[in-house]
Image: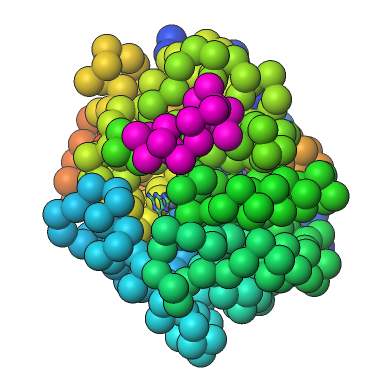
Amino acid sequence: MRAAYRASILHCLSDPGESADLSAVDYFEDGLLLVEDGVVEAVGDAATLLPQCSGMALTEFPGKIIVPGFIDCHVHFPQLDIIASYGEQLLDWLNRYAYPAEQRFADRAHAKEVAGVFLDELLRNGTTTALVFGTVHAHSADVIFEAAMARGMRLVAGKVMMDQNCPEALRDTPESSYAESRALIERWHGQGRLGYAVTPRFAITSSEAQLAAAGRLAAEFPDTWVHTHLAENTSEVDVIRKQFPRHRSYLDVYEQFGLLRERSVFAHCLHLDDDDRQCMAKKGGAAAFCPTSNLFLGSGLFDLRAMRAANVRCGLGTDVGGGTSLSLLRTASEAYKVLHLQDQSLPATRALYLATLGAAEALYLDDKVGNFESGKEADFVVLDPAGTSLSARRTAASSSIDETLFAITMLADDRHVAATYVAGKQCEIK
Ligand code: GUN
Ligand code: ZN
């Protein structure tokens, strides 16, 4: 099955950096994306590629921009229904909103209903791959994997491990969390486009025995992911200091328990020092930059310049329900502002990188997704610069793709996503 898609096409080949390096992006004003059996065959100028396309199904999107599918490096599907809950910083917010919502996931039917709605919302926003937290219930992982498989999405997820400092109803034990996570790995990891993440919530909610159990899983299944939170909030960091007085830093806790390795993804990473950043880069760990959450929960400002200077892999995360949008375009617009406050720049092409190829590198999935190199899976989004009447007016006056992409990023929501494709198939978005 071969198909061709004609529109403006933009994708990243590497990190454009703060100076928007032109050689890091490929742009075809009148472009063609050729897809065969769900995989990218070629991308280039329509004038060059059209002669190879006789007899192929050709879909044209005049005035639209095709970009790679967005990749969300950190999100909690069980928190969908508490998005936009008023007033608290992290530790109180967990107790007041997140934990009660997660307790409702004891009901598998409820978890299944939320999983379907959640993934449809991701697709509506152009997100084709995500790294997803479940709840402590093993069936939370089952239902999100089942829903992702039904939609053909690439998804990495895991059951949360937590055995202390949280409501009784949400606690597992070192032994049960090890056994359940192991069974889920055996059931789901590597099935189609699915992968498993060993998911200790954060060091506050795991005993040392449980962190050690998570570390054992991470060592026994080295191609799984590790997914947790790190240094998000100053009160959280204070608790960690008291809980682990012998450790040099918060990151050092994870490192000592074998949880810092390639495919380890740490949400937030706001309150780190240079030694942490060096260590994270050396061990191949990655950071999820979650600006809407960091602003909403009053957590702090992510230092992208310092992270990238240390060569830490970075991608964007929405962190719903601490975050306030599932749209990675909206997330990128808040990232721009967070960086602006620190005298750092975020050109539109770098924002695109953080939502696509950079995120794929953070997740060690850049051999499969993230841009349109031939052989990669054909996950793509058709952006509509005229998604709203205001953005239509603004982008009509634009004189370059950078200007158009920047305006879409600042003004966008799901109305700017005209279509989403996973593995070459258009998603039917409910
Ligand atoms: N740290 C531990 N758990 C959570 C969570 O659910 N959301 C956020 N934003 N941070 C956390
Ligand atoms: Zn989170």
Q: Can you see residue 384?
A: yes
Q: Residue at x 68, y 39 (%)?
A: 257
Image check: 370 left or right of 405? right
Q: Nearer the viewer, residue 324 or 302?
A: 302
Quadrant of image for the N terminus: bottom right
Q: Can you see residue 232?
A: no
Image check: 120 left or right of 278? left
Image coords of residue 419 (percent x, y):
48, 59
* Magenta portion: prevailing SS class: helix
Give residue 317's quadrant in the image: top left
Q: Nearer the viewer, residue 285 or 255?
A: 255
Q: Residue at x 69, y 27 (%)?
A: 284
Task: Tell me if residue 314 is in the magenta stretch.
Answer: no
Image coords of residue 258 (percent x, y):
71, 38
Image coords of residue 268 (percent x, y):
43, 37
Image coords of residue 239 (percent x, y):
37, 40
Whether residue 198 is situated above or below residue 101 in the rendered picture: above
Q: Residue at x 41, y 36 (%)?
A: 242
* Segment colored magenta: 237-253
Furthest-left residue in this view: 87
Whether residue 24 is situated above or below residue 54 in the rendered picture: above
Image check: 153 left or right of 397? right
Whether residue 23 is situated above or below residue 149 in the rendered picture: above
Quadrant of image for the C terminus: bottom left
